[in-house]
Image (cartoon, rainbow, N blue to C red):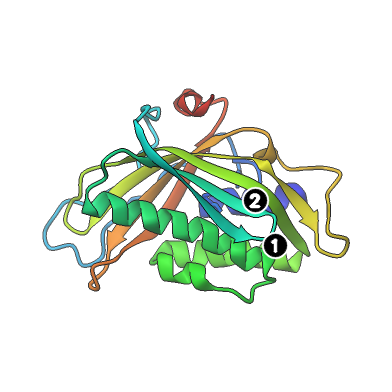
């Protein structure tokens, strides 16, 4: 059951969320082939496609932000140095979708604020991920980390973001007992690389539109190892 949740998580991308579950918004195989991402409402610009063919590049960190998702659940985000307005908006959306989806899980589905940070395919993907936790009476506890964030150039209303995800500080819980499962899923052991197609809405807000991932032992993920 833990591995089943993980598979849903990684298909959704959460991001927190490679073999198991959390944000994260995790893994269903060695790699996930990226789908083509076409920015909705793009005015003649080229499409943006989540591309996981290259390893993440180390980037300077301006600051580290800690989000208290819920009692016992934290999200640590290492922001890129000197982000411009679009980059800051994309990082904030990525952070909010991760924190929000974890919050939905630990509140038993009562908090659905994560939906404000997503659009397009990501809405159904994260809703499915949260639903699997609730159906199987699972929750999470611990700390997830997001680092080595990079944002590609804005193309029309679309862009691509990449981030290393480390959820090894988290544990999957049985909601009936509040205790960690004896058999923990793969996402509690090693980092993975998350790619997100980002879309700029008519309201001027960036949101996560599509999520894809890849995991070790892929060469492209080795840049996430610390």
Residue 77 at x, y = what percent? 47, 45
Residue that appears at 24% across and 53% down? 86
Please say whether residue 17 is visible from this viewpoint: no
Camera-side residue: 198 or 42?
198
Q: Position of residue 161 (x, y in %)?
A: 35, 45
Which is nearer the N-term, disc 2 or disc 1?
Answer: 2
Q: Is residue 183 above or below residue 173?
A: above
Q: Residue at x 60, y 52 (%)?
A: 74
Position in image of residue 186 (x %, y %): 69, 38
Give the residue at mark 1. 133
For label 2, the crowd category at 10 Å Cα-Cα, with few meaning under 14, some 14 to 19 and many 20 or more, is many
**Looking at the picture, does residue 103 appear above or below residue 168?**
below
Q: What kind of element bears circle 2?
A: loop
Which residue in the structure is indicated by mark 2? 21
From the viewer's perspective, is 144 left or right of 185? left
Quarter of the image where one finds residue 71: bottom right
Q: Tell whether 113 sits left or right of 157.
A: right
Examine the rendered structure and indicate whether residue 194 appears above or below residue 126: above
| Along the line of sight, the residue nearer the viewer: 191 or 127 | 191
Q: Tell me if label 2 and label 1 are in contact, CB under 8 Å.
A: yes
The Cα–Cα distance between marks 2 and 1, rounded to whole angstroms, is 9 Å
Work out which quarter of the rendered image holds the C terminus and state it: top right
Residue 173 visible in image:
yes
Looking at the image, is 219 positioned above or below residue 194? above
């Amino acid at each position: 059951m833990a591995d089943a949740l993980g598979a849903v998580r990684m298909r959704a991308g959460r991001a927190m969320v490679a073999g198991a579950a959390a944000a994260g918004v995790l893994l269903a195989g060695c790699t996930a082939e990226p789908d083509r991402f076409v920015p909705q409402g793009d005015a003649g610009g080229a499409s943006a496609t989540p591309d996981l063919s290259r390893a993440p590049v180390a980037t300077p960190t301006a600051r580290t932000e800690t989000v208290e998702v819920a009692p016992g659940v934290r999200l640590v985000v290492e922001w890129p140095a000197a982000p411009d307005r679009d980059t800051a908006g994309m990082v904030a959306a990525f952070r909010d979708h991760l924190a929000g989806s974890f919050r939905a899980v630990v509140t038993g589905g009562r908090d659905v604020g994560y939906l404000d940070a997503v659009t397009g395919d990501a809405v159904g993907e994260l809703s499915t991920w949260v639903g699997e936790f609730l159906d199987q009476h699972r929750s999470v506890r611990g700390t997830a980390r997001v680092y080595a964030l990079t944002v590609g150039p804005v193309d029309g209303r679309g862009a691509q973001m990449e981030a290393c995800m480390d959820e090894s500080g988290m544990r999957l819980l049985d909601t009936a007992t509040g205790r960690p499962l004896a058999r923990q899923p793969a996402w509690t052991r090693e980092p993975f690389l998350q790619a997100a197609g980002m879309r700029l809405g008519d309201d001027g807000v960036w949101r996560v539109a599509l999520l894809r991932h890849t995991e070790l032992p892929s060469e492209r993920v080795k840049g996430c190892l610390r």
